[in-house]
Amino acid sequence: MSATPSQPVTHDPGARLSWTLRPVISTHQTDWERKREDMADVCNQCHADAWVQNYYKQFDAYVELYNEKFARPAQKIMDALYAAKVLTPTRFDEPIEYTFYELWHHEGRRGRHGASMMGPDFVQWHGAYEVAKHFYSQLVPEAERLKPGITVPFLAGAEHAWRKGLTREQIQEQIEFYRKRYQ
């Protein structure tokens, strides 16, 4: 499946990947634009160009949402805890280190890899849902117990504003949105 009229077969599964999804925060690979073009060439052998472009739009959006809403704040919270010396330099000797690891390595990776493979259950229920659940119900409270106020600067963005509650107008806007969308 990897061969195209302009590319030979490859058995290197990473040769045409534009993202690396392994680290806490996903990053583009070196020469990612060329790799993406090469992969799109493979995809275009069976799929229409619009389908391929839409796939990448959704995939990129998910990875960027994960990075910005959860991965970067979680990493900054952990860095701040280490800098404040409320965590020891030894990894995995405090519960929050396990929470952080599970968040990005297991749950975050499942969601990101699910997005790369168009697996909606892995994107949503085994990925995003579990990331959000454990970020807000475990990592943030654990960090606050260790050093009250430490998460505040990292959760000040609009993507976390829901935690402060919604106005009646915002609630009504959401109700109307879903009524129109789902009748």
Image (cartoon, rainbow, N blue to C red):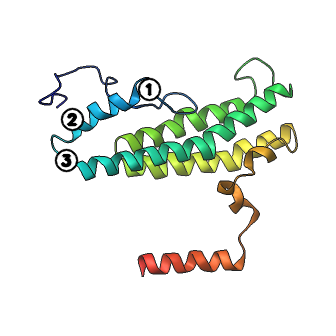
Looking at the picture, how far across and down is residue 174, in whole percent?
Answer: 58, 74
Q: Amino acid at mark 1?
A: Gln
Disc marking residue 103: none
Query: How far is disc 3 from disc 1 in space, using C-alphas?
Result: 24 Å
Quarter of image, res 70: top right
Left or right of 49? Residue 159 is right
Q: Residue at x 30, y 24 (%)?
A: 13
Q: Nearer the viewer, residue 133 or 39?
A: 39
Q: Nearer the viewer, residue 126 or 116?
A: 116
Disc marking residue 47: 3
Q: According to the image, label 2 marks what residue?
A: 42
Looking at the picture, how far across and down is residue 59, in whole percent?
Answer: 41, 45
Q: Are marks 3 and 1 in contact (CB under 8 Å)?
A: no
Looking at the picture, how far across and down is residue 148, in whole percent?
Answer: 88, 43
Q: Residue at x 45, y 80 (%)?
A: 180
Q: Secondary structure at mark 2?
A: helix
Q: Amino acid at mark 3?
A: His
Q: Residue at x 23, y 48 (%)?
A: 49
Q: According to the image, label 1 marks what residue?
A: 29
Which sits earlier in the primary sequence, circle 3 or circle 1?
1
Left or right of 57? Residue 75 is right
Looking at the picture, how far across and down is residue 75, in whole percent?
Answer: 68, 33
Query: How far is disc 1 from disc 2 in space, using C-alphas?
Result: 18 Å
Q: Are marks 3 and 2 in contact (CB under 8 Å)?
A: no
Query: How far is disc 3 from disc 2 in space, using C-alphas?
Result: 9 Å
